[in-house]
Each structure stands twice: as structure tokens, then as C-alpha cells.
Image (tube, grey):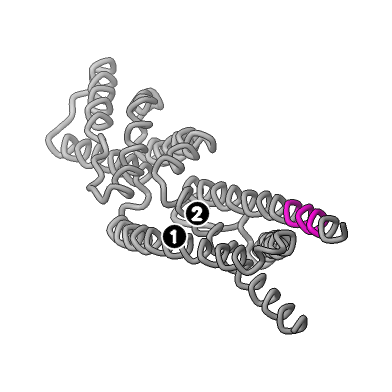
Amino acid sequence: MKVVKKIVQIIMAFFLSILILANFLMVLVSQTVLQKEYVLAKVEEVGYEEKIQTDLKNGFENYQYQSGLPASVFENLYTRSSLQADIYCVVNAIYENEEVQVNSEEVRTKLEANIQQYLSENQIVLKEAQLQNIQDFENIIVNVYENRVNSVADYLDTIQKVLQKVKEIAKIAQIGLIVTLAVFLLIGLVAQMREPSEFVNQLAIALLSSGVILILLQKIIHQEIDIQHILLLNQSFSDFVKYILFDLMNEINFYGMVFAIVGFCGIIWSRCRAAK
């Protein structure tokens, strides 16, 4: 009878470990990458706006050399607040399933004003063909701005659809996992009502196992996936993705340690309690 009871306890501890792991990972994903507020917070933390500014500067310089226009023409084409608003607009569009409304016309207006000022100061009169070239040049610079700010433009529709689907599945899965975990805990508590220390020991073993698995999972991901050299779309976006991935890895490692410590302490407490 004791052997059967021990086997049942091991099975319960195993399923509890799986449920604790699944609940934790589901909550982690739901409260981070599936939340617009989390991504916006990381935009601030990683200095994404400054990285985009560097990309824009490099992009403008490439065309400056080709055009022969002075650097002053490419200065102050956008304000920091307008760039920040456009970045937020892209993030909001992804999570709210909306179209992106990047304010690139401000760039066009300021670029045109800078060019006209340069022509006026140097008393340069353009012919009709040259005016058309200037118009084409303005379109190119506006495209540079739009492509750097909205680097996911070509994949926006796919990202929105996948994200919405994942959010729907995650919502249902989270409820199901929480209910299942609660049922298992209730069954374990009822089964060990006469020996509460055994229930605590069983739960502590599950927590310790979950913690160890999380720590190992974090280490395996670091070893098997070269996060540091991930390249997606452009360097700024890649750095942002890497920052989030490292943040998630740190969360997994931290809570893995917390689960392991709490589980270990629970096992010691329950054993001391049973020995009395």
C-alpha cells in the first residue's frame, strides 16, 4: 500500500511540475511580448529611438554624397518627439491591428525648405528637368525615413495576424492551465488532508523540479541559440529583439532560482515537520 501511495505521489508531483512550468511560461509570454505596454517600455529602456536616429543619419549621409548637397540640407528633418510618436505608432498598429500612419510628410516639408534655402543662398536656378530630379530625391529621402522607422512594413499584416491568433490561444490556454493546476492542487490537498506536511512536500518537490528545469532551459537556449548574432531586417530592430530575448532569459533564470529555493525550503520544512 505504501508503494502504491508513493507512486501516486511521484506521479502527482510530476504533473504538478509540468503544470507549474506551463503556467509560468504562459504568464511570462502573456505579460511580456503579448503586451503593447511591455514592448513600449522596452523601446524606452533599450534606447530604440537613438538607434533609429543613427540609422537615419547613416541613410541620409549615403544620399548626401550622391546628391552633392551640403550636410545642412539634411539637418532637422524631424524632431525627436515626432520620431518617438512614429515609433509608438508602429508598435500600436502591430498590437491594435491598425494601419501605420508614419508622419513622413513633415520630413518632406522640411527637406524641401532646406533645399530651397540652399538654392536661394547660392543663387541657383534649376531647370524643369532638375526640378523633377529634386522631387525624386525628396521621395527617396522620405522612403529612407519610412523604411527605417517602420522596418516591419513588409511583414506588418502577417505579424498582426499571427499576434492576434497567439493572443487568442494564449488567453484560452492560460485559463485552462490555471483551472487544471487548481484542480490538481485541490486533489492533492484532499488526498493528504490528514498529513498536510506530505502535501507541502509534494508541492515543494514540484516547485524544485520546475525551478531546475527553468534554469536548465535558460542555459540550453543560450548554448543552442546564438542570440547575440541574430540579424532581422536591420541592426536597430535586431538589437531590440535581442534585448527582449535576453530580458526573457533573465526572467526565466530568476524565477527558476526562486522556484528552486522555495521548493528546497519546502522540502526541508515538510521533512522536519514529518519527523516530529
Drawn side of residue 91 relative to residue 45, left or right = left
Q: Which residue occupies the foreground of this view, 273 or 213?
A: 273
Q: Main secondary structure of the magenta part?
A: helix
Q: Amino acid at mark 1?
A: Gln
Question: Could you tell me which residue is drawn at 68 percent across and 53 percent down?
Answer: 253
Q: Which residue occupies the foreground of this view, 65 or 51?
A: 51
Q: Amino acid at mark 2?
A: Val
Q: Which structural element holds mark 2?
A: helix
Q: Residues within 10 Å of mark 2 (few under 14, many from 20)?
A: some
- The stretch in magenta equals 261-270
Question: Could you tell me which residue is drawn at 29 percent across and 61 percent down?
Answer: 161
Drawn side of residue 221 relative to residue 46, left or right = right
**Disc number placed over residue 174 in the picture, else none:** 1
Question: Could you tell me which residue is drawn at 41 percent across and 37 percent down?
Answer: 56
Residue 144 lies, in percent from the top left, at 34, 43
Mark 2 in CB contact with mark 1 (< 8 angstroms): yes
Between discs 2 and 1, the one toward the N terminus: 2
Q: Is residue 120 above or below residue 91?
A: above
Residue 247 lies, in percent from the top left, at 59, 47
**Disc number placed over residue 27 in the picture, else none:** 2
Q: Is residue 265 magenta?
A: yes
Q: Is residue 209 visible?
A: no
Locate the C terminus by quadrant: bottom right
